[in-house]
């Protein structure tokens, strides 16, 4: 019965990836209107109307409020294009005023002017920058209700599964009052559960979850996008898996910079089993051979590309060692690739940073969020090479069945908007990659966050000692401290040093995450010490009591700089939220990964100056800025190459389809 219901429901086809002449004209018009301030003036006009209507609607009883909301829903059901028609825009101030009242009645929270302004800009099709702590969750819920009223799929994209579940649970009373259903799509759901979840008017899920389900549905129905053909193919039966999504229409992206930029550096790949015992034997042998190769003599490590390149000596040694090996090793390219993966597993991919070992299995850690990703695996034999290096049971390799970049996927949505607290320096890329404008909404309260000058050190050991010393001093002053690290091993090292000196702390990383909500809730208490990887905080408020606010608020200590200043601010933004006091400071060492990986060649001659105490601070500041600039440039080029590769694959598939016809 479930399968029959799924196959007969309406499916909304995604937007075509090809730009038409009409789309180009509309794109140009939107850009001009943005530059001329048309959208900004319209937003201010609508805000004045909303504030007048709020006084009137706040006196409505529940029955009259529901009647008014239903009336708005009838008008917004006509909002089925890539832009809202004027007949819908005219009703937007009234609808948002009613939604604000509904939010107050159902959640006990009234949206501020900042959140209403953000909702208007998002409904206009923009990515909005809101100051940390200004209430993105409520602003996203306002625009999600407007988009959910048209009856087409509305997906609210969150930074992680925890936030998707939390927001769904907390906002359910609000959506119910608005006459909408809401659900969460999670990785551990069955196909039947996912199909039921996607039938909701508003669905909360991560970008990875949405793209994975989209690709699986495409595989199930052989990539058919025409609604009638999909219906006929599903009705024909014999499918191993029923499609789960209703299609794509609108996406509201929380933490838009993380989802659309930071996580878009690599495509999402759907893999299937590929039994290959010969490869498993070769991987085991490659692990043994790798121990005979020395870095900088037999090969060079390229940390930027996470790759190794063989020297002439290394190539000669490999050729010699393979003379008496099985036939699989006779092919030059194949044996180089096998050994390359073994060396990458040994020298580049690090335990408790790129992966953890859980119950005898390799579990990948997402470097952007610090969260483990069970069930995911690396491609091209790398996963098996890491398993061999760790001495766990080897899993069978997989073959790629489908792949897609996040840029191509999100361009399939007819309506795309979102919000973030950190959009610095990416407005151009968001426009080029996703055709979305960026709008900065002024904060409601002036920021009281103090960002102290970076502390610089020659070695990592000196830096860790300074962090521990600063943490203890702040703890003794009854100030809460959040120490943010990029690696699990660093968080464990700092926690261990604090414990050795008799200071208790909470640890939050991919290994210790079961009590995440409780740890975050307690992190702002007087004298509380929390050591966490990047998984902490995205989308969650660390609340501080009044006694903490009076003496300085939450203090954030950043273990090392990230690839961009924008990502640094994601951690800094955990303190000083909603006008509260706070302090943030970065600790920098000459041996930090950022400098080793991304310092450009023309910055290398400056490194000896780091050893001079009088030049160290300025030099480390300068080379860190250079490394961040090069890292962002490198990652931006990677994302552009992904878009080009997706277009090439799409053109090849289109040519193949025409040839078959």
Image: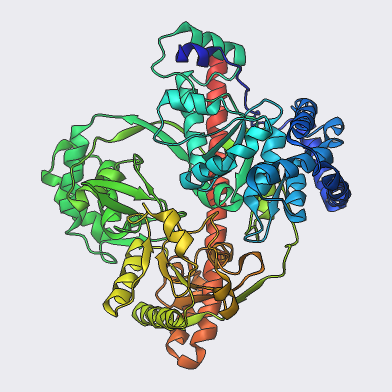
Q: Please state the horizontal and vertical placement of residue 592, each as a whole percent of the image.
A: 42, 72
Can you say whether 305 is above or below 202 in the image?
Answer: below
Q: Is residue 324 left or right of residue 42?
A: left
Specify the quadrant that holds the N terminus: top left
State the count of labels: 0
Residue 135: percent from left, percent from top: 65, 54
Residue 157 in view of the camera: yes
Q: Quadrant of residue 654?
A: top right
State the colouring used for the structure image: rainbow
Q: Is residue 116 rendered to the left or right of residue 426?
A: right
Residue 425 spot, x, y in % from top left: 65, 60
Q: Is residue 179 left or right of residue 614?
A: right
Q: Residue at x 77, y 41 (%)?
A: 96
Q: Which is nearer the eye, 544 or 499?
A: 544
Q: Residue at x 34, y 43 (%)?
A: 374
Quadrant housing residue 427: bottom right
Nearer to the camera, 53 or 411: 53
- Furthest-bottom residue in view? 614
Residue 305 visible here: no
367 in relation to 660, above or below: below
| Residue pictured at 81% horizontal, 42% vertical | 59
Residue 264 position within the rendered picture, expressed as x and y whole percent measured from the top left:
53, 47
Direction left: furthest residue: 324
Vertically, is 494 above or below 155?
A: below
């Amino acid at each position: 019965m479930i399968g029959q219901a799924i196959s007969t429901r309406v499916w909304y086809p995604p937007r075509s990836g090809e730009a038409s002449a009409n789309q180009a004209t509309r794109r140009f018009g939107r850009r001009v209107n943005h530059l001329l301030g048309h959208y900004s003036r319209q937003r201010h006009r609508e805000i004045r109307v909303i504030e007048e209507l709020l006084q009137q609607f706040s006196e409505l009883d529940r029955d009259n409020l529901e009647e008014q909301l239903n009336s708005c829903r009838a008008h917004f059901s006509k909002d089925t294009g890539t832009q809202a028609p004027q007949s819908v825009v005219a009703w937007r101030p009234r609808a948002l005023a009613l939604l604000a009242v509904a939010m107050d009645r159902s959640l006990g929270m009234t949206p501020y002017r900042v959140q209403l302004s953000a909702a208007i800009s998002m409904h206009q099709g923009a990515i909005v920058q809101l100051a940390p702590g200004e209430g993105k969750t409520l602003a996203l819920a306002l625009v999600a209700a407007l988009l959910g009223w048209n009856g087409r799929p509305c997906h609210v994209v969150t930074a992680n599964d925890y936030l998707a579940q939390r927001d769904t649970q907390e906002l359910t009373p609000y959506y119910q009052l608005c006459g909408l259903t809401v659900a969460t799509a999670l990785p551990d759901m069955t196909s039947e559960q996912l199909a039921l979840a996607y039938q909701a008017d508003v669905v909360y899920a991560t970008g990875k979850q949405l793209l994975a389900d989209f690709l699986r549905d495409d595989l199930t129905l052989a990539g058919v996008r025409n609604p009638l053909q999909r219906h006929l193919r599903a009705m024909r039966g014999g499918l191993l898996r029923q499609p789960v999504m209703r299609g794509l229409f609108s996406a509201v992206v929380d933490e838009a910079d993380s989802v659309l930029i930071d996580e878009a550096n690599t495509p999402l790949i759907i893999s299937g089993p590929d039994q290959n015992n010969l490869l498993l034997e070769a991987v085991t042998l490659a692990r043994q051979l790798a121990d005979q190769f020395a870095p900088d003599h037999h090969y060079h490590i390229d940390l930027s590309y996470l790759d190794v390149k063989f020297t002439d000596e290394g190539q000669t040694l490999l050729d010699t060692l393979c003379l008496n090996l099985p036939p699989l090793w006779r092919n030059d390219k194949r044996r180089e690739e096998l050994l390359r993966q073994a060396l990458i597993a040994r020298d580049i991919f690090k335990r408790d940073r790129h992966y953890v070992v859980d119950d005898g299995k390799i579990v990948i850690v997402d470097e952007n969020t610090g969260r483990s990703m069970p069930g995911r695996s690396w491609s091209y034999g790398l996963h098996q090479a890491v398993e061999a290096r760790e001495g766990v049971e080897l899993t069978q390799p997989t073959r790629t069945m489908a792949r897609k970049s996040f840029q191509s996927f999100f361009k399939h949505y007819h309506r795309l908007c979102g919000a973030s607290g950190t959009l610095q320096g990416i407005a151009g890329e968001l426009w080029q990659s996703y055709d979305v404008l960026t709008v900065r909404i002024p904060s409601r309260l002036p920021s009281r966050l103090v960002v102290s000058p970076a502390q610089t050190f020659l070695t990592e050991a000196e830096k860790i000692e300074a962090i521990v010393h600063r943490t203890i001093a702040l703890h003794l002053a009854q100030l809460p401290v959040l120490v943010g690290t990029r690696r699990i091993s660093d968080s464990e090292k700092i926690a261990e040093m604090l414990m050795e000196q008799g200071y208790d702390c909470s640890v939050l990383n991919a290994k210790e995450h079961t009590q995440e909500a409780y740890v975050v809730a307690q992190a702002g208490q007087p004298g509380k010490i929390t050591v966490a990887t990047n998984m902490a905080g995205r989308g969650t408020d660390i609340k501080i009591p009044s006694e903490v606010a009076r003496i300085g608020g939450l203090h954030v200590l950043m273990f090392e700089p990230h690839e961009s200043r924008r990502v640094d601010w994601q951690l800094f933004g955990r303190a000083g939220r909603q006008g509260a006091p706070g302090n943030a400071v970065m600790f920098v060492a000459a041996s930090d990964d950022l400098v080793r990986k991304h310092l450009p060649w023309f910055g290398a001659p400056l490194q000896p100056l780091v050893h001079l105490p009088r030049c160290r601070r300025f030099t480390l500041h300068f080379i860190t800025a250079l490394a961040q600039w090069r890292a962002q440039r490198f990652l931006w080029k990677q994302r552009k190459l992904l878009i080009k590769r997706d277009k090439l694959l799409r053109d090849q598939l289109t040519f193949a389809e025409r040839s078959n016809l």
